[in-house]
Amino acid sequence: MERQRKRIGILYHFSPKWMGGVIYILNIVKVLNFLKDEDKPELFLFYNSNLQRFVDELDYPYLHKIERPYPSVYSTFIKSFLLQKNLFVANLISEYKLNTIFPLHDYPVQSKTNCKLISWFADLQHLHYPSFFSYIKRFERYLRVQFILRNTKDLVVSSYDVKSDFYRFFDIPNHVKFHVYHFVSIVDKFPTYTKEQVCKEFNLPDNYFVISNQFHKHKNHKVAFKAIAKLKKQGQIIHLVLTGKLPEDSGSQYINELKKILDENELHNQVTFLGVIPRDMQLSVMRHADAILQPSLFEGWSTVIEDAISLQKPVICANLSVNVEQLKEKGTYFSAHNATELSEILISKDFSAIPSPIYESYEERVTNAAHVLLKILT
């Protein structure tokens, strides 16, 4: 007799502009595919129509894809208060007989339910770098955290570094249980493009470093630009390849700062902007790079570093405590604002000659993550 599968609701309502959140949920579904069939839960994915293209790529045997707009946040908060019921999820629980819902961002009140309601908060960047957020955004994030801490019993965070931030910035109620789930990068199909094909396709030199980040200020591309500018003055030519979506605002202050560094140091022939490219091609560009650069000023848990680990590529990154938690002794670290230090690292050795494997096997990492996640969800 087949064992009854747990019924888990997955809320997928992030903006497509926040690729971190979009990819996080995709990987939640994909990683569970690494469980034995008898251990796989039944998943109910509730999503907005603007995420359809991402939902279409999911192939999980016990997945129900349900297009369902997310309720209006402000009015649903008010109605939830009045009725003392969490109306963001109440109907989902009863209609689909759910055992668990994840990730629950909006938690206006505690509800009497046997369904396990699990919150998630990616990071507390707004408290480390408030200038990167508008006042309204900072206030919204503050309120959301306060309601989660008041009402949730289970809170998932992406790293022990984020967990320590919660204890640093907030008084944590005794009823809140933290779960640390280390996101892992799922590679649906490992790239097969050769280095020659990649370099020909994008007109790249044989040796290059790659940064695969969106162009937000905290991603700190500037330090890499300044590093290669210093090396150019010394007669050392380093090529950078950048993937990621450029801001829609053509007047972006951050992009203008980057362009200024390129113009003043005549670096245009040393930096290649690829923009958003297909996932298999992006992974190919990363696979054939000498190393992956992650100069970010802040991360909750780096998707780029996870991609590098899955591809067995060396990583040069800012010495954030979360990066050290992620890479341990396998990473090469520099001070996030120190372009001189980074420039010295870039020419310190031949990163392309580092033997593989560098990290534990892909299958082992992903399977372990699947079991950790299942334990949290059930």
Image (tube, grey):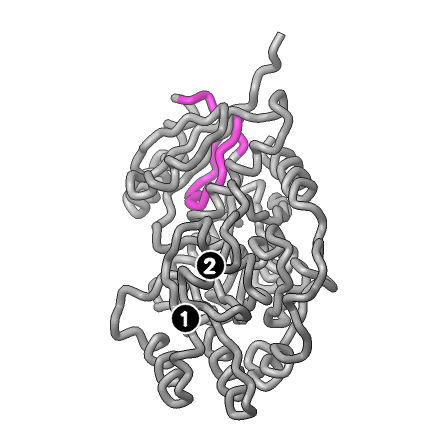
Quadrant (top left/top right/bottom left/bottom right) for the N terminus: top right
Rendering coords of residue 125 (x, y %): 49, 64
Whether residue 171 appears in this view of the structure is: no
Q: Position of residue 294 (x, y in %)?
A: 55, 67
**Which callout, 2 or 1, points at the residue further toward the start of the chain?**
2
Determine contact: label 2, label 1, CB under 8 Å: no
- Please tell me which residue lies in front, 203 or 16: 203
| Callout 2 secondary element | helix
Q: Quadrant of the C terminus?
A: top right
On the rendered structure, is 44 left or right of 99? left
Residue 304: horizontal and vertical position, in percent?
53, 58
**Mark 2 sits on what residue?**
198
Depth check: give the residue in front, 144 or 79: 144
The picture places residue 113, in percent across and down from the top left corner, at 50, 28
Spatial separation of the CA atoms under disc 2 and disc 1: 13 Å
Question: Considering the numbered disc 1 on the image, is that residue within a helix, a strand or a loop?
Answer: strand
Which is closer to the viewer, label 2 or label 1?
Answer: 2
Please say if 273 is above or below 357.
Answer: below
Q: Which mark is residue 272?
A: 1
Q: Nearer the viewer, residue 193 or 142?
A: 193
The quarter of the displayed image where residue 47 is located: top left
In the drawing, what numbered circle is on residue 234? Answer: none
Q: Residues within 10 Å of mark 1 (few under 14, many from 20)?
A: some
151 is within the stretch colored magenta = no
Look at the magenta stretch and give its main secondary structure.
loop
Q: Which residues are magenta?
A: 96-116
Q: Amino acid at mark 2?
A: Val
- What amino acid is at disc 1? Thr
Residue for point 32% across, 32% down = 67
Q: Is residue 99 part of the magenta span, yes or no?
A: yes
- The residue sitting at the bottom extreme is 233
